[in-house]
């Protein structure tokens, strides 16, 4: 350990600062010289590229001049010639290539132009701009650069350069003649955008270097192009010192290329390396100082932390022991050999064995013999998975073995962890004997209630059938006999007994209404056609009666005729549809109800759907929804299912699925509970 970190840290900081400063000064000078060499080489390349592109323009204009002198091209011939050479793609920055023919003295008019677009089309046939600046006699291959037209600020309106070459009527032959030349017959005239020309000539180089092109033949000099237009970042001192000029002569006119390194010039970025060395050295010294101070503080903190950890460990062990001892579940911890190391009081009560007897013995003594091999493999496989905890034996009962030999069902979960002695497995389990007994009793009670409910439904149907038959057979016959007696009495009345005849007519109507009402009540209790004709005719009668009684359009759609339908299933389906229609009449406010009956190889399907206001989840779950409860109970007694689909404002759909007889589905017996 270092005993005196502060003086040593300051000494190291001073030495590092001196060394860093020396390195920084050396790197600064070296990088400046390297930047100058790099900058000079790049500007030479840009000037060379610029001259090369001007040479391409000279050759292109010379060929065009020979062509124009030989054929005096029309606009179509000129455009076809230029397109065949591909000048718009091979000459960067070319805006216009025109042939201007000399006419009357002092007039030069544009007779052919390329490309022929909106702006150039207006120039065709018009006098050539700056025609007065073009000489009437010139060498055949002279490349003339027209002077710029500066605006009030001393610069041109656009970054363009205009080149011209004379055209002689004799064509190519005139170019090989004597020194005395005839008068110029016209000019091939090119308008070039300098920004596009330079971007094509040196695209990557101009990214790091600012370029200004000036026509210095004019007085004062006129700026043709300046890449520094717009906002510019501030430059480093060394970057602003990197600049140089070069001249290019074009037949008597001089272009001055002014190069200046900008903030993107890669050589100027080297200045940051020296600064980074200085900053890094200072930061390293400060880091070392902080490290030495932290080292001294750490020596004190380590001792205090060790004391606190020891105290916390003892406290946590005490708390853990208290939790284990007071836990309401049996807690058993075993080592890798599955020998018990922890056995809490609840485990003592469940397994009827004291902790003194259990600790150190194998866990297998508390597992029935038929499960011991499986349990050992389960623990071994669990240790290989690396999972911290999981449920044991999900989906199947587990069994424990008390000290007296009794077996009992348990629920258990297992976890694993490592300590200094190795891997430990902890099992949390509870005795679920009472819960299983309660579940069995509850299931038995449910079965008894289901049988009772089925018996009540059967008795109700029998009672309804009995009452319906009594009304139809007994009361109906009595009313019919009374009607016949009343008819005989009406015949026996004297002709002048008008009042009595009116009285008997009223009695006829009353008896007829009573007979109709008795039939309706009997049909509501138990339609006779359900027993005589079957389910489908009974549903047809129910649909017609419902539509007539409530004014709601009702459609019955039968996809399969249930010829093999047993009586219980037919009665249940009829009552379910009847209850569903009652709910529609009471709550739905619908205008259309559809009843669909179908069957497949396994089950009968019934769907009752309306276009009413529907119902939400809260309405369906009301405890007083006895209609749906009754429907669900009828379906459950026959081993079927009920499904409800409804959204407020989108109608209500009830679907019933009842298994066909003989499909192996469990149905509740309708016999009386024993």
Image (cartoon, rainbow, N blue to C red):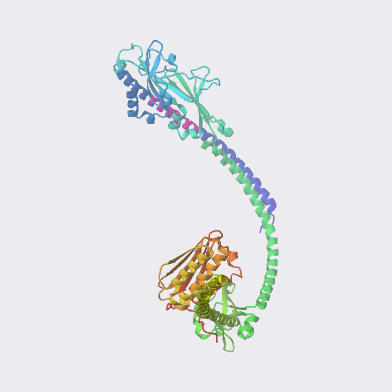
**Rendered location of residue 217, percent (x, y):** 48, 18
Please indicate whether residue 23 sits to the left or right of residue 563 in the image: right
Q: Residue 32 sits in which quadrant?
A: top right
**Rendered location of residue 166, percent (x, y):** 37, 17
User: Is the residue 468 above or below the residue 28 in the image?
Assistant: below
Q: Residue at x 33, y 24 (%)?
A: 76
Asked if one can make out residue 129 in the rendered structure from this viewpoint, the answer is: yes
Q: Is residue 54 magenta?
A: yes
Magenta residues, start to end: 39-57
Tell me the quadrant of the picture where the C terminus can be found: bottom right
**Rendered location of residue 269, percent (x, y):** 54, 38
User: Is the residue 2 above or below the residue 306 in the image?
Assistant: above
Which of 155/521 is in front? 521
Q: Residue at x 65, y 54 (%)?
A: 291
Asked if one can make out residue 632 in the rendered structure from this viewpoint, the answer is: no
Which of 127/437 is in front? 437
Which of 493/511 is in front? 493
Q: Residue 298 sits in which quadrant?
A: bottom right
**Rendered location of residue 329, percent (x, y):** 63, 78
Q: Residue at x 64, y 85 (%)?
A: 354
Tell me the quadrant of the picture where the N terminus can be found: bottom right
Q: Residue lying farthest bottom? A: 404
Q: Residue 335 sits in which quadrant?
A: bottom right
Please indicate whether residue 42 sits to the left or right of residue 63 in the image: right
User: Is the residue 204 above or below the residue 58 in the image?
Assistant: below
- The dominant secondary structure in magenta is helix
């Amino acid at each position: 350990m270092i005993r005196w970190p502060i003086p040593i840290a300051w000494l190291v900081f001073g030495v590092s600062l001196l060394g860093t400063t020396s390195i920084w000064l050396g790197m600064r000078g070296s990088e400046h010289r390297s930047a100058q060499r790099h900058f000079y080489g790049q500007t030479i390349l840009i000037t060379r590229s610029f001259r090369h592109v001007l040479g391409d323009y000279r050759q292109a204009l010379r060929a065009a001049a020979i062509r124009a002198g030989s054929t005096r091209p029309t606009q179509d011939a000129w455009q076809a010639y230029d397109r065949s050479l591909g000048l718009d793609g091979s000459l960067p920055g070319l805006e216009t290539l025109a042939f201007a023919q000399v006419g009357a003295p002092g007039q030069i008019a544009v007779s052919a132009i390329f490309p022929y677009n909106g702006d150039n089309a207006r120039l065709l046939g018009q006098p050539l701009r700056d025609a007065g600046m073009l000489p009437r006699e010139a060498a055949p291959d002279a490349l003339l650069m027209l002077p710029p037209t500066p605006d009030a600020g001393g610069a041109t309106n656009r970054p363009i350069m205009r080149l011209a070459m004379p055209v002689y009527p004799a064509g190519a032959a005139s170019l090989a003649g004597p020194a005395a030349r005839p008068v110029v017959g016209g000019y091939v005239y090119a308008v070039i955008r300098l920004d596009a020309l330079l971007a094509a000539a040196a695209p990557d180089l101009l990214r790091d270097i600012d370029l200004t092109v000036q026509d210095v033949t004019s007085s004062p000099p006129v700026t043709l192009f300046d890449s520094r237009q717009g906002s510019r970042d501030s430059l480093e001192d060394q970057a602003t010192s990197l600049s140089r000029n070069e001249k290019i002569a074009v037949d008597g006119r001089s272009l001055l290329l002014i190069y200046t390194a900008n903030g993107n010039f890669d050589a100027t970025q080297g200045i940051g390396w020296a600064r980074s060395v200085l900053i890094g050295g200072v930061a390293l010294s400060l880091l070392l100082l902080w490290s030495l101070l932290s080292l001294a503080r750490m020596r004190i903190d380590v001792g205090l932390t060790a004391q606190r950890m020891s105290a916390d460990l003892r406290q946590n062990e005490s708390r853990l022991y208290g939790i284990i001892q007071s836990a309401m579940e049996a807690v058993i911890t075993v080592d890798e050999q599955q020998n018990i190391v922890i056995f809490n009081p609840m485990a003592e009560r469940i397994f009827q064995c004291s902790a003194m007897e259990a600790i150190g013995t194998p866990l297998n003594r508390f597992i029935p013999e038929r499960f011991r091999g499986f349990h050992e493999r389960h623990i071994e496989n669990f240790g290989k998975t690396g999972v911290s905890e999981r449920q044991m034996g999900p989906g199947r009962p587990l069994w424990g073995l008390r000290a007296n030999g009794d077996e009992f069902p348990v629920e258990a979960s297992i976890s694993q962890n490592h300590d200094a002695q190795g891997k430990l497995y902890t099992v949390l389990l509870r005795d679920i004997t009472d819960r299983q007994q309660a579940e069995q009793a509850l299931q038995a009670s449910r079965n008894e209630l289901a049988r009772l409910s089925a018996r009540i439904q059967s008795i109700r149907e029998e009672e309804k059938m009995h009452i319906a038959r009594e009304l139809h057979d007994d009361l109906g016959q009595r009313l019919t006999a009374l009607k016949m007696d009343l008819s005989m009495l009406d015949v026996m009345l004297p002709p002048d007994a008008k009042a009595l005849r009116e009285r008997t007519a009223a009695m006829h109507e009353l008896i007829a209404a009573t007979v109709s009402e008795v039939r309706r009540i009997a049909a509501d209790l138990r339609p006779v056609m359900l027993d005589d004709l079957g389910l489908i005719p009974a549903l047809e009668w129910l649909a017609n009666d419902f539509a007539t009684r409530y004014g709601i359009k009702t459609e019955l759609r039968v996809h399969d005729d249930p010829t093999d339908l047993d009586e219980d299933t037919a009665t249940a389906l009829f009552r379910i549809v009847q209850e569903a229609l009652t709910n529609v009449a009471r709550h739905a406010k619908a205008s259309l109800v559809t009843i669909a009956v179908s069957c497949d190889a396994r089950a009968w399907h019934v769907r009752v759907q309306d276009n009413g206001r529907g119902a939400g989840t809260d309405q369906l779950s009301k405890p007083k929804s006895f209609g749906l409860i009754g429907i669900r109970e009828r379906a459950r007694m026959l081993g079927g299912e009920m499904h409800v689909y409804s959204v407020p404002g989108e109608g209500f759909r009830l679907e019933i699925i009842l298994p066909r007889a003989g499909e192996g589905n469990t149905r509740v017996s309708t016999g009386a509970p024993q």
